[in-house]
Image (spheres, grey):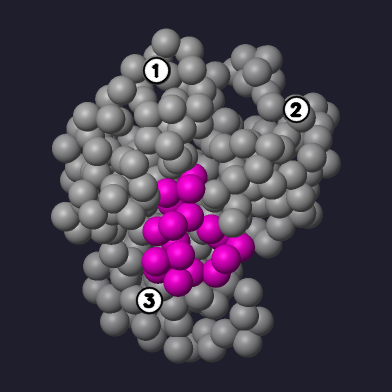
Amino acid sequence: MQISELFDQIEQLPMVPEVVRTLIMQLNDPDIDLNSVAADVAKDQVISLKVLKIVNSAHFGLSRKISSIDEAVVMLGMAKLKNIVVASGLTSSVHHVVGMDMKKFWQESIYIAGIAKELAILADESDPDAAFTAGLLSTIGSLLIVMGVPSQSIVIKDKQDAGMGGYEAELEVLGFSSGNLASNLIEKWRFPHILGDAIFAYQKPLLLAKDNALASLLNLAQYLAREKLKSSDFDTIMASFPYDVANNVGLNHEAMECHLDSIFVEISGLDELLN
């Protein structure tokens, strides 16, 4: 099967709200117009209401209620607000797919995003905002597989349940990986290449792109996100931790021991995006 054939099987590909597209396109723009961004967010009623709900949640612990996007920019800063807006928009882009628990899917995605951002800060190897956005998008390939070829997605899952790695199972059944599929969708969306390049390689970063730090960070973030969702303790997490990938970005056991709890606390507020 070709990737284009799978896309043809999907009645409607996921769409990204315009304000989210704008923010992602300006990921590395130091001259971004904050007032313009706030105005664009305010125009999208669904996203702006979701953002304000999150900003006013207990996680942020603000001393007073925030009632406008302009206030949110002042109280949180643009970097944090951008990530909330991007996450709000993307998690609203697909609501229902037969055979998928969408809340569970997006919860894993936002955990990957939050952890990738924190690891990027810790490793000082990648832009944290790019890591957050890439984390959100990293699993969308698996969603596209279920949307486009649901019967083959079941075969892939059965192979994984039997002990085969997800990447290997996808290659055997489809001839390409979910990371490759996601990177093609990102190219269709005309998002920055830094996102697609990292997501293409993140399932096997040392094999496909050893010099791409963001790919390694996404690989680590996915592992940690899945362990958090299983409520694994530290020893269990570290027993199967991909140290070879972590060493590729300068992270070791000591770094994880010092920072993992705080990383998990930092991402806990992201659950508000799903309520």
**Is there a contact, CB below 8 Å, between mark 1 and mark 3?**
no
Q: Position of residue 60 (x, y in %)?
A: 50, 55
What residue sits right under mark 3 in the picture?
A: 19
- Asked which secondary structure carries label 3, the reply is helix
N-terminal of the two: label 1 or label 3? 3
Please say whether residue 62 is visible from this viewpoint: no
Mark 1, residue position? 159
State the residue in front, 83 or 242.
Answer: 242
Is residue 19 found left or right of 205 in the rendered image? left
Determine which of the numbered discs, if any, sits on residue 35 in the image.
none
**Secondary structure of the residue carrying numbered label 1:** helix
Figure quadrant of the N terminus? top left
The first of marks 3 and 2 along the sequence is 3
Residue type at mark 3? Val
Q: Is residue 29 above or below residue 7?
A: below
Crowding near the residue tagged with mark 1, few <14, some 14–19, many ≥20 C-alpha atoms within 10 Å? some
Taken as a whole, is the magenta stretch helix, strand or loop?
Answer: helix
Counting from the top left corner in percent of width and height, residue 33 is at 54, 88
Q: Earlier in the sequence, mark 1 or mark 2?
A: 1
Badge 1 amino acid = Lys
* Of marks 3 and 2, the one in the foreground: 2
What stretch of residues is rendered in magenta? 179-196
Question: Dot 3, how many residues are within 10 Å of its Cα: few (below 14), some (14-19), or many (20+)?
Answer: many
Amino acid at dot 2:
Tyr
Q: Secondary structure at mark 2?
A: helix
Q: CA distance from mark 1 to mark 3?
A: 39 Å
Residue 243 shows which numbered tag?
2
User: Is residue 182 depicted above or below 229 in this figure?
Assistant: below
